[in-house]
Image: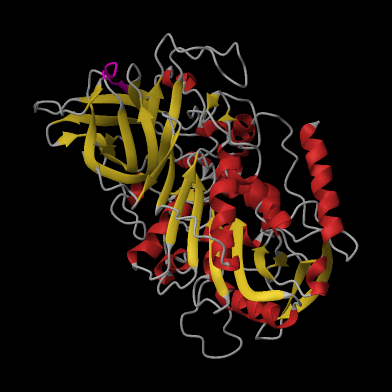
Amino acid sequence: MAQLTKAKEDSIYVRQHYTKLERMVPMRDGVKLFTSIYVPKDVSTGAKYPIMLCRTPYSSAPYGDTLYKTSLGPSMHFARDGYIFVYQDVRGKYMSEGDFEAYRPFIPNKKNKTDNDESSDAFDTIDWLVKNVAGNNGRVGTWGISAPGYYTTMTNIEAHPALKASSPQAPVTDWFMGDDRHHNGAFFLMGTFSFISSYGAPRPTPSPKGKPGFSAYGTPDGYEFYKNLGPLKNVNEKIFKGENRIWNQLMEHEVYDEFWQSRTPVPHLKNIKPAVMVVGGWFDQEDLYGPLKAYAGIERNQPKSPNHLVMGPWIHGGWARGTGESLGHIRFGSRTSDFYQTNIELPFFNHYLKEKPNPELPKAYIFETGSNEWKKYDQWPPKNTVEKKLYLHSDSSLSFSPTITTAPPAFNEYLSDPDKPVPYTAEIRNIRGSDFMYEDQRFAAQRPDVLVYESEVLTEDVAISGNVFANLFVSTTGTDADFVVKLIDVYPGNAPNDSPENPRKAMGGFQLLVRGEVMRSKFRKSFTVPEAMVPNKVEHVAFDMQDAAHRFKKGHKIMIQVQSSWFPLVDRNPQKFVNIYKAEASDFQKAFHRVYCSGNSSSYVSVRVLE
């Protein structure tokens, strides 16, 4: 009830204090983009305000001068503080003209007006806004979450001089390497199918309505639906019929070719002039990769302007909604989203756009899960960390010491059957959701095709901050395989049943997923040129599991699980070296996989431990 009351109050505030305008803003090539502008009413008295711009493929609705958004800005703190808010449908989406291209490649050396990209569209938009919107103070900020986060990143490349501050939040940064559609070359089936069914649907002419996503699952059980669907090629044959352009592009580019390479902004994050604050969530089910790589990409080029990273205990966009006190069965001990909005986000923009006091934000403002504390660091990862290796042992133990050399090398083996893939969640659901990012992993640990390695009870805290990286030595009886590695915090048996979601949930022995990642082994040497596994040959499969900031507390244990399917989150690997997007049902085969644990073939996961 309190939330409903607040939402109503916000909506009334917006209508009382803002005037809405709708304009078609011309780009350099003549294409016009639909732009919705909310201006504080007191500009009529001479008041001046900065502009906050959000460019989105998800609609700047509602459409019509008399129809208002019910809240404005990154949070209503901005609306109450006073800003001009601008929402724009990107080229080819909703009411904007032109053709849509998912993550249009940046053109470094534009030769004429038809050479346009998201950077130039942002430049032209900002240029028009500062010249045509009454009451602006000549300063512009940009923000957006997810795809709008990507468009925010692009505003910083060859930025307009009026752009002073920018916050890419969970920005899509690379659809092949780690965001949304693929991770390390493995196709994220469940989220991609449901999302692209709408996002990639044809839009012949500008329209205020988008196409609805696929809904004819016929079952609440996604595991059942995707199993019955069969190989990936059946999606087009049975459902899309070749009419979904983005799905077709995904199916045509199985490797990290020029198509994918040209679509990431990271190589172009040079000479960045606006102040940047990249934001992400440790439990982001879609774009954990993006903020980490966008921040690092800017940082590598030593920008003269400030570059900040903020990572909190949030799912995708969780910092912009809810209080951030908990996720699932896990409590964080404070209202982390409120803290971020009040003490980090608003002061950042107010400083650069309104010349208010410098909030003196640290280089990296990081929430450490486990201890549930905000940490301030002058670099990311922090200086005071050392790389340590969590070694997998054939007796299912886990430690920071390797197994003494044995000949032949020790190993653990399991049978991976594509007809009985390991589920990614214990829930019955046909839409991916976010719960799997912090779900109790005991359901998976019980399966014979999941290897479990567990440490002794910790006698002191182990705090990690920075990259987590898997180094596996493996063999298979097939010619391809996926390897999923999960880093897990195991609660002690006497952990209190303090779940905010279900007070009857047994938290003793809870297996909290800290970080999980997948690698398609055909890409172990190159993401551009895949290579078959040689049956029964020991191969090194190493991959980035992204960053983490977590404290494994005294009395807990550290666990690592290894498996070869994560279904239907990730599509099934046939375990045969083929183009999986074109594979037949007959290509799918059982295979035995071995994980080696001694000598020169000692598998481990490296973490950065705070000293």
Looking at the picture, tell me which residue is in the foreground, 434 or 125: 125
Looking at the picture, tell me which residue is in the foreground, 513 or 225: 513
Q: Was residue 171 drawn as part of the magenta stretch in this picture? A: no
Question: Where the N terminus falls, by quadrant?
Answer: top right
The answer to which quarter of the image holds residue 147 is bottom right
Q: In this view, does 526 lie to the left or right of 134?
A: left
Would residue 196 be visible to someone looking at this image? yes
Residue at 51% across, 34% down = 437
- Dominant SS of magenta comes to loop
Would residue 248 be visible to someone looking at this image? no
x%, y% of residue 98?
71, 75
x%, y% of residue 234?
61, 46
x%, y% of residue 412?
26, 24
Q: Is residue 66 left or right of residue 554?
A: right
Question: From which residue to which does the magenta span run?
Answer: 453-459
Question: Where the C terminus falls, by quadrant?
Answer: top left
| Residue furthest bottom as drawn | 112
| Residue furthest top as drawn | 494
Residue at 68% across, 47% down = 238
* Number of disc labels: 0
Residue at 77% across, 75% down = 46
Looking at the picture, tell me which residue is in the foreground, 97 or 218: 97
